[in-house]
Amino acid sequence: MYKSFYSLAKAPFSKDINPKDAYGSKDYQGALGALQYLQKSKGMGLLIGDPGVGKTFTLRSFRESLNPALYHVVYFPLSTGGVMDFYRGLAYGLGEEPKFRKVDLFRQIQQGIERMAVDRKITPVFILDEMHMAKDAFLQDLAILFNFQMDSSNPFILVMAGLPHLKSRLALNHHRPLSQRVIMKYEIQPLSREEVTFYLEHHMKLAGSKMPIFTEPAIETIATRSQGWPRVINTLTVNSLLFGFQMKKEQIDEEVVRMAIEDMGL
Ligand SMILES: Nc1ncnc2c1ncn2[C@@H]1O[C@H](COP(=O)(O)OP(=O)(O)OP(=O)(O)O)[C@@H](O)[C@H]1O
Ligand SMILES: [Mg+2]
């Protein structure tokens, strides 16, 4: 296996990377800062970015930073279920037995949120991931569902995350009731050229690498081809390690990376 060939303790870029092992890129920190602002002010926020730029990972870090005694997190990726499942899941998540009719369910969710926030002093945090997949009707529902007529502050935190075109969709006239309530917007940008080197070395160190395996030109090629998108860097790096191992190369050079790129059809 390439792991023992390159003296690695484990494969790099594990799916379940711990937030404490995050690489603190400028935008990772910026996005977390924006989410912390939302944590204080409460209400609705928007986190967007290209595929594989680190949205879900950042949301996981945010989620794990919240004190469970004060925040109740409901995470829902839109790719996994229908919207009725989501509403029912919300009711369940708030400790209620979901009502059957949508109108009753909505009232129940709103009351559940208020009870949790006011009586138990716990802030419900709703994280809706992959929101670019949301149908128009769902976006319109959200504007109704999260419309609280409370004097002081919002009793909830709602983060909507998705691809950049979500922002333009929300800007459309018929979504104004929702977009006007969004108080935080952050777009995660890809890693800069310099950050790609640090990111790659950071992950290789986490995998147990004791010395540089990638040559400078190899990293340069990875940086150019990946355009700084972490997920592409991950796959390209692992693929390069596989090819390097097959070719019995002690160091991954540009030639190996080029083979990996070709293999991936990039
Ligand atoms: N700051 C970081 N530190 C360490 N690893 C990171 C960081 N940001 C992103 N990653 C890595 O990049 C991978 C892809 O990120 P993620 O799944 O969060 O992207 P995404 O923006 O949610 O993509 P999609 O739009 O396809 O859902 C993560 O699994 C993780 O390995
Ligand atoms: Mg994601």
Image (cartoon, rainbow, N blue to C red):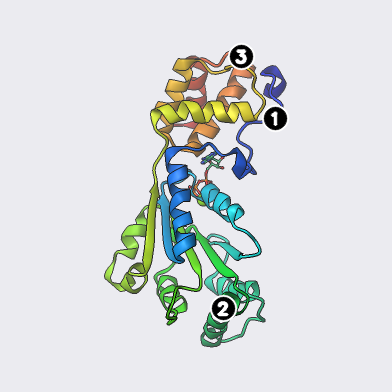
Q: How many marks?
A: 3
In the displayed structure, 37 sits above or below 231; it is below
Q: Which residue is mark 3?
A: 247
Q: Which residue is mark 2?
A: 118
User: What residue is at 65 percent from the left and 29 percent from the top?
Assistant: 207
Select label 1 or label 2 by which is in front: 2
- CB-based contact (under 8 Å), mark 1 and mark 3: no
For mark 2, give the secondary structure.
Answer: helix
Coordinates of residue 99 in the picture (x, y in percent): 61, 85
In the displayed structure, 141 sits above or below 244; it is below
In-front residue for pair 245/130: 130
Coordinates of residue 131 in the picture (x, y in percent): 46, 61
Callout 2, which amino acid? Answer: Val
Select label 3 or label 2 by which is in front: 2
Q: CA distance from mark 3 to mark 2?
A: 63 Å
Q: Residue furthest left?
A: 173
Specify whether 9 is left or right of 149.
right
Callout 1, which amino acid? Answer: Lys
Coordinates of residue 217 in the picture (x, y in percent): 44, 16
Number of residues whose C-alpha sits closer than 10 Å to that of mark 2, classed few (under 14), some (14–19) or many (20 or more): few
Locate residue 174: give its quadrant: bottom left
Coordinates of residue 147 in the picture (x, y in percent): 43, 78
Select label 1 or label 3 by which is in front: 1
For mark 1, give the secondary structure.
Answer: loop
For mark 3, give the secondary structure.
Answer: loop
User: What residue is at 42 percent from the left and 35 percent from the top?
Assistant: 191
In the displayed structure, 189 sits above or below 142; it is above
Q: CA distance from mark 1 to mark 3?
A: 20 Å
Q: Which residue is mark 1?
A: 10
Callout 3, which amino acid? Answer: Met
